[in-house]
């Protein structure tokens, strides 16, 4: 049994593990498959975790597939707010020999792959091209211990800038907001994304300023920088990190009056201006199917990487009005969902 002093020492280094212990686990610990997850951020409260799981499309799909944590599987979670903390969490999951690892982004998948080349890894929603990132050999035949879904979010930045241009009158200066807690693990992807953004911005006549954050406290500094630069809009990237801090991002965008476009609809429903990207629920359902198949014996090397077939435009008219923006009727007609 761990002492309170030892627990606090672990928490200080970010190596705290959250383990869900149940009667079922206590009775049959060796017969239940163990799934390990590395997540960005501090260890959540039990209540916050329960609420997240109950509304998460991935876990809803897992339940439909017959998997319930504590009944016929055990979920091990590790959290961290820095690359080092996340790396220690990943190493711990490998040390306890979980049967499968799950990551919500390509950066986290890379971090897990640095620790193991044998334990299967499923990526729930990679922003980057997994082949270009060096995580899989090909989309059709991943070839290693990683498979899952890629959202192509980075490839959609030019389209998001185009949408901002359509909404913000005379848009000539815009910001890109991203993180490098996990993306720093994929050094080749940054320049590739920057080239795409620079080319798109030039074609649209937009001057781009990039703000990179490493922790939640950097967000306010970034938005102050946008105001100083007189940026008229911002494209928010890095959904795994930004989603964890979405409340702060949304509040700062509103407080500074900066129109923002996001990668996920989850940002628009609580007050974000608009999003353009995949249906995340659909992609997470696909990821759950892969977890199910691997837990039943399939090999990730033989499971093709899933890609989206449809992209959705979501617009929040209430937020547009608060920002003094008029959404063109042609854009409203194109929207998959309009929040009023």
Image (spheres, rainbow, N blue to C red):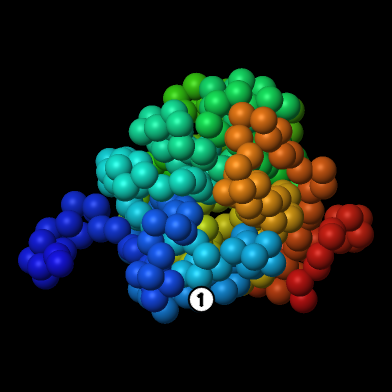
Image coordinates of residue 89 in percent, x first then y, are 31, 47
Task: Name the side, left or right, on which 190 lies relative to 318.
Answer: left
Q: Is residue 82 visible?
A: no
Q: Which residue is depicted at the point 44% across and 54% down?
A: 34
Image coordinates of residue 153 in percent, x first then y, are 65, 41
Q: Is residue 3 visible?
A: yes
Q: Nearer the viewer, residue 18 or 30?
A: 30
Q: Give above or below for 204 relative to 105.
A: above
Q: What is the crowding at mark 1: few (fewer than 14 residues within 10 Å), some, or many (at least 20)?
A: few
Q: Quadrant of the N terminus?
A: bottom left
Q: Which residue is depicted at the point 34% across and 63% down?
A: 19
Image coordinates of residue 275 in percent, x first then y, are 69, 55
The quadrant in which residue 25 appears is bottom left
Farthest-out residue, left = 5
Farthest-out residue, bottom = 47
Q: Nearer the viewer, residue 198 or 196?
A: 196
Task: Name the side, left or right, on which 69 lies relative to 127.
Answer: left
Q: What residue is disc 1 on?
A: 51
């Amino acid at each position: 049994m761990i002492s309170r002093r030892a627990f606090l020492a672990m928490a200080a280094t970010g190596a705290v593990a959250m383990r869900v212990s149940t009667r079922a686990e206590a009775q049959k610990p060796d017969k239940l498959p163990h799934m390990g997850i590395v997540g960005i951020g501090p260890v959540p409260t039990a209540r916050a975790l329960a609420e997240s799981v109950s509304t998460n499309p991935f876990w809803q799909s897992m339940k439909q597939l017959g998997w319930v944590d504590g009944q016929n599987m055990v979920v091990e979670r590790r959290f961290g707010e820095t690359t080092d903390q996340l790396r220690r969490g990943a190493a711990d999951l490998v040390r306890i020999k979980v049967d499968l690892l799950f990551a919500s982004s390509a950066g986290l998948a890379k971090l897990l792959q640095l620790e193991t080349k044998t334990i299967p890894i499923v990526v729930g929603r990679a922003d980057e091209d997994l082949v270009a990132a060096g995580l899989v050999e090909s989309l059709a035949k991943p070839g290693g211990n990683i498979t899952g879904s890629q959202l192509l979010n980075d490839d959609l930045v030019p389209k998001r800038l185009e949408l901002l241009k359509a909404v913000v009158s005379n848009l000539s200066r815009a910001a890109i907001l991203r993180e490098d807690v996990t993306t720093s693990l994929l050094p080749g992807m940054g320049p590739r994304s920057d080239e795409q953004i620079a080319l798109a911005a030039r074609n649209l006549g937009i001057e781009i300023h990039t703000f990179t954050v490493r922790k939640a406290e950097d967000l306010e500094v970034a938005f102050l920088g946008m105001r100083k630069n007189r940026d008229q809009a911002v494209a928010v990237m890095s959904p795994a990190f930004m989603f964890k801090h979405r409340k702060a991002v949304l509040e700062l965008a509103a407080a500074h009056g900066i129109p923002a476009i996001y990668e996920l609809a989850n940002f628009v429903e609580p007050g974000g201006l608009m999003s353009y990207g995949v249906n995340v629920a659909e992609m997470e359902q696909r990821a759950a199917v892969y977890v199910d198949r691997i837990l039943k014996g399939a090999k990730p090397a033989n499971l093709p990487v899933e890609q989206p077939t449809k992209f959705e435009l979501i617009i929040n008219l209430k937020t547009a009005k608060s920002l003094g923006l008029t959404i063109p009727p042609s854009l409203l007609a194109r929207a998959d969902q309009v929040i009023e």
